[in-house]
Amino acid sequence: MAECHPVGFQWVMEAKARGAKVIHVDPRFTRTSALADLHVPLRAGSDIAFLGGIINYVLQNDRYFRDYVVAYTNAPTILSEDFQDTEDLDGVFSGLDTDNRTYDKSTWQYEGSPDVRATSGERDRAPMDGNRTVTEAGRGEATGSGGATLEECDQERDVTLNHPRCVFQVLKRHFSRYTPEMVEQICGVKQDAFLTVCEMFADNSGRERTTALAYALGWTQHTVGVQYVRTAAILQTLLGNIGRPGGGIMALRGHASIQGSTDIPTLFDLLPGYIHMPHAHTDENLDAFVAVQQTRKGYWGATRSYVVSLLKAYWGDNATEENDFRYDYLPRLTGSHSTYDTVRAQIEGKCKGFFLLGQNPAVGSANAKMQRLGMANLDWLVVRDFSLIESATWWKDGPEIETGEMRTEDIGTEVFFLPAAAHTEKSGSFTNTQRMLQWHHQAVEPEGDARSELWFMYHLGRIIRRKLADSTDEMDRPLLDLTWDYPTQGELLEPDAEAVLAEINGHDSEGRPLSSYQQLSSDGSTSCGCWIYCGVYAGGVNQAARRKPGSEQDWVANEWAWAWPANRRVLYNRASADPDGKPWSERKALVWWDRDREVWTGHDTPDFAVDKPPWFQPAEGATGADALSGTDAFIMQSDGKAWLYAPAGLVDGPLPTHYEPQESPFPNALYGQQRNPVRQLLPSGVDNRYHPSGAEQGADVFPYVVTTYRLTEHHTAGGMSRWQPYLAELQPEFFCEVSPELAAERELEANGWATIVSARGVVEARVLVTERMTPLLVQGRTLHQIGLPWHWGPNGYAVGDAANELTHMSLDPNVHIQESKAITVDIRPGRRPRGPAAADFVRSYRTRAGIDEHTGRAQ
Amino acid sequence: MGVRTWIDSWPVYRQLKGNDPLGRGAAVKSPLSSERKARLDTADRVVKSICPYCAVGCGQDVYVQDGKVTQIEGDPDSPVSRGRLCPKGSASLQLTTGSAREHQVLYRRPNSTEWEHLELDTAMDMIADRVVKARREGWEWEDIHGARTRRTMGFASLGGATLDNEENYLIKKLFTALGAVQIENQARV
């Protein structure tokens, strides 16, 4: 955090100055470690074992926050008799379909409640007819018929937590083998260091104290990435660290609006506000679509209002009750259409055109060579960026030109490079990592041909609509019926960003701005482009532009900008008070029930109906928010509870389980199951081969683990930092971090060159020999890890090979994110081969390790 | 030059007599340096902004003079950052005004070895034609099982995490209306 979010880290140091303890768990010693009370190096790819070990410690030693757990979590809920755990099946859960690499999740449900909905993640997957199953993203509407009549309230609960099938007992059994000895074997963390972490964590949690977890892509870029975060959620929930000040699990995100681009998603599987994209279906309609997504209880009960208001924002007066609000205008999914699947579609020749809008996959995405091969097979490519990034120039100077695998004259891709406007040259909002929308005002006009994406998209849409204006083709109706008439400003005809924000916020039938998503209606009288952002333009005022100085506000500072939802700074903050509505402790008070005024009040906006008393019990048959009791603090959940166990929503198990990475030098010490059995693998082309693992023959050809990371002085794939002389001078070239022991073992010289190779590619890097890298003792032998910052590429001032030449495409099955945080490699001294010899070199490694299209693909 | 002026021009005297006993400020200024003004002092206006790099969201003050950005500083009012910027945020003046930025549309014909220049309007028109064509060629009313898909697999988009919410909104809205589903950004990576 000190490296990649240094200005955010000042608050960690403020806390430390007041007595907080800082623990840093990372394979490398970094600036964060230098400022922490304790640094714990561990093996990349072993965090579920580490966190699972802490969970086991908390459960075995009764260190959990029992009152919180009983009141606010699903710990008491009884599970179906049919559920079988990894304890029963040697590392897999019941329902595994080995042929199709998928789970039938029906046995994971609560007793007496066969259709509990997840409010995020995979809500809408179901087996298809006959033997076929949709493995990547199913046809959700198939389960829609039962949706609106769910009876989650009928779940059986045992508040003594003693029932052998209650979530609490299942959890206890599941994690019982995650002992300190096992943590040492898997993670390479000494037991005394591990137990120190456990004690510090537990001592600092409970009524009087809270502990926060902060993480970044070290947890997500894995074939079990979602389950890493789930493990953290279980731990924090058991300790009562959610919804309370100083608690939580914070994603430290790396782009100015990467949170915003998830909320208002440029993502294939979502519509704005975490509404899922519809899946292909033979008889779908709005009712069926809504029925699958909505829950009987909680704020997703109003799903129809959110969806209808979005359709009204898109198609305006053309969207009416009679035509299902133009629901049919939405394109449908049939599986995963992630960017990695798109690379495959490009190589197969199905995807012919590609827009790159401020992104640099030629060096920034996993398996960079495959990215370039995909682009080389396009008809056209549009690159919008500040400078000539590698994704714009690969056709003349990419690595494949050097190796002779491609010839510029043979590449038919037409390339358009359009210069982009900078943040100082346009107005708009970024959503930061705390869900806070902050407006930046335009300072100057962009020069030359530089334009904003707002300009580009608006005018592209305008031109295409003009070209197709006379079309009578049904295909073109969604485009021609679209509301697309934004006011423009200045000589450049820049669309008014605030007008777009107003559309996102929404308005009523009279055009008046809405102030809350609770005003949204399912009858078509309201329009709202993103329901969770409703209120950002309340009163016709740009709330994201609020700038009352922090020094003039309290510690919550809720008059600075605007956080979704409802300007709430801590989600689920009802849980900061006990079931009676009193703060768990005075020093951790955030919101509470004011008995005199009979309202929820406090420092933050209460995450609860403001007049719903703690003792409230819903009427029989109540739905939506009305069905939440006064203690259902987790208001977005279909049962109002935090999920220690996830009966739905995840495709790879209701509980996290340690699996080895796709590529690992070690067998799984916990189970017979080596890897996540339902991880997503891309079809095996020769350029995306996987390595053997553990005891498999050839695994020793790639004996070291690489983990990738970022530096303070650079930004992601370098498009915004390698061209800046100051930053290029601070971190001028690609390097690898190795321990003195590994340097001795492989005769690597400090400041010299190292060649690092995988079955996908080869790179060279300057050698940084440093004790910041610690050899670890794992399963009785020494493991060396290599750190690789991944910012480089051949263009710009600071140049070097791209770490992504080494990485492969194997994905988390829930969210389709690649495993680039733990791969295996070999390293040797000296510079890499050049020209055709480089390709031969990689090929020779594949041969030595006996790698073919089957390697690493076993379940 | 009078005696008084002469003595006042002597830094040691100013250091002993004035408010700068350590000689680190006004006491040691030469006539030349005392006449210099900071860029911040001469700016025409200060525009409130947010750092474009990571997701911490530090506040920035953008100084503008004669229609040009002349300096970018941390915004002390921000409760997020309290005026601080990291090395990247501090380099955002170079990011926005540096010579590495391209300001012209470039075009590479199929199989060509070089870039050529293109008017922005021409490029927009050409891109629009290509979208229409790729969209039509990749159009699917149904999937292989006969389920209605109403979409195109002919083109894809990647990017958005560095952009504004309003921009992402228009990207998703337009491409969805065109029937595209392969719309992605860095959040996937």
Image (tube, coloured by chain):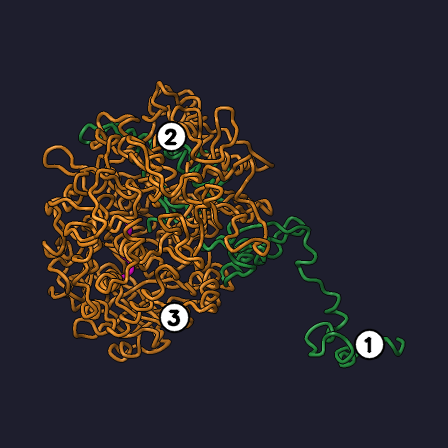
User: Considering only vertical position in the picture, is A362 above or below A693?
Assistant: above
User: Considering only vertical position in the picture, is A501 above or below A795?
Assistant: above
Q: Nearer the viewer, residue A146 or B33?
A: A146
Kind of residue sitting beneath label 3: Ser
Q: Is residue A89 left or right of residue A599?
A: left
User: Which of the labelled discs sits on residue B8, or is there none?
Assistant: 1
Whether pointer 1 and pointer 3 mark residues with C-beta atoms closer than 8 Å, the reply is: no
The residue beneath circle 2 is: A305
Kind of residue sitting beneath label 1: Asp
Name which residue lies at 34% across and 41% down: A636
* Segment tinted magenta in the rendering: A817-822
The answer to which quarter of the image holds residue A346 is top left
How far apart are the two marked residues, 1 and 3, measured between alpha carbons? 52 Å
Looking at the figure, which quarter contains the N terminus of chain A?
bottom left
| Mark closest to the chain's N terminus, 2 or 3 | 3
Q: Nearer the viewer, residue A423 or A519?
A: A519
x, y percentage for residue A311? 39, 29
The residue beneath circle 3 is: A33
Both labels 1 and 3 in a single chain: no
Q: Nearer the viewer, residue A511 or A259?
A: A511
Label 2 resides on the chain identified as: A
Chain in orange (letter): A
Q: Is residue A805 left or right of residue A715?
A: left
Figure colour of chain B: green
Kind of residue sitting beneath label 2: Ser
Label 1 resides on the chain identified as: B
Q: Secondary structure at mark 1?
A: helix
How far apart are the two marked residues, 2 and 3, measured between alpha carbons? 48 Å
Name which residue lies at 59% across and 53% down: A549
Q: Is residue A553 visible?
A: yes
x, y percentage for residue A168? 21, 53
